[in-house]
Amino acid sequence: MITVFYDGKCSLCAREIRYYQSRQPLDFIQWVDVMDNKPKTQEMMKRIGLDTTTALKFFHVQDDQGKMHKGVDAFIVLWRGFKGWRLLAGFVSLPIIKQVAEFLYKVFAKWRFIRSPHCALVMRQHL
């Protein structure tokens, strides 16, 4: 089982997660909205050392061994969990492709974080 940590208040992120949720994964996936203020969610994140601000900055996935992955590596772990997406996971894992994907993802993630009002609010709460 893998655990996917996502920003449920980001319309783009939530739409993408709904797409994955509508597909048939090869194994069970636990979906965790990092903006969910339920005690269970907050306790789980605290236990693994993932604070809300960090989780909002980059997409995170915990693999079935308990290892945390972020950004492109997190997408690769997620994609490997779906029959039709394994090829993409392998392609993006190629050295030069992965470097380009990581650069592009970091640019996008920074842009998304800066322009999202709820991210700014969380940042101010944690200062």
Image: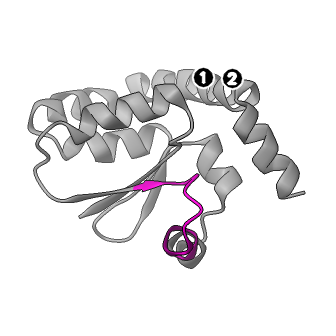
What residue is drawn where x is 16% and y is 36%? Answer: 86
The residue tagged with tag 1: helix, strand or loop? Answer: helix
Estimate how packed mark 2 is, as few (under 14), some (14 to 19) or many (20 or more) residues with alpha carbons within 10 Å.
few
What residue is drawn where x is 33% and y is 40%? Answer: 76
Estimate how packed mark 1 is, as few (under 14), some (14 to 19) or many (20 or more) residues with alpha carbons within 10 Å.
few
Name the kind of residue labelled 1 in the image: Phe
> Residue 57, relative to residue 90: is it above or below?
below
Write down the region rendered in magenta. 32-43
Q: Is 26 a magenta residue? A: no
> Residue 34, relative to residue 112: is it above or below?
below
Which label belongs to residue 43? Answer: none
Name the kind of residue labelled 2 in the image: Trp
Residue highlighted by disc 1: 108
Q: Nearer the viewer, residue 13 or 103?
A: 13
Q: Is 42 a magenta residue? A: yes
For the C terminus, the image quarter is bottom right
Residue 18 sits in quarter: top left
Q: Position of residue 62 (x, y in %)?
A: 40, 61
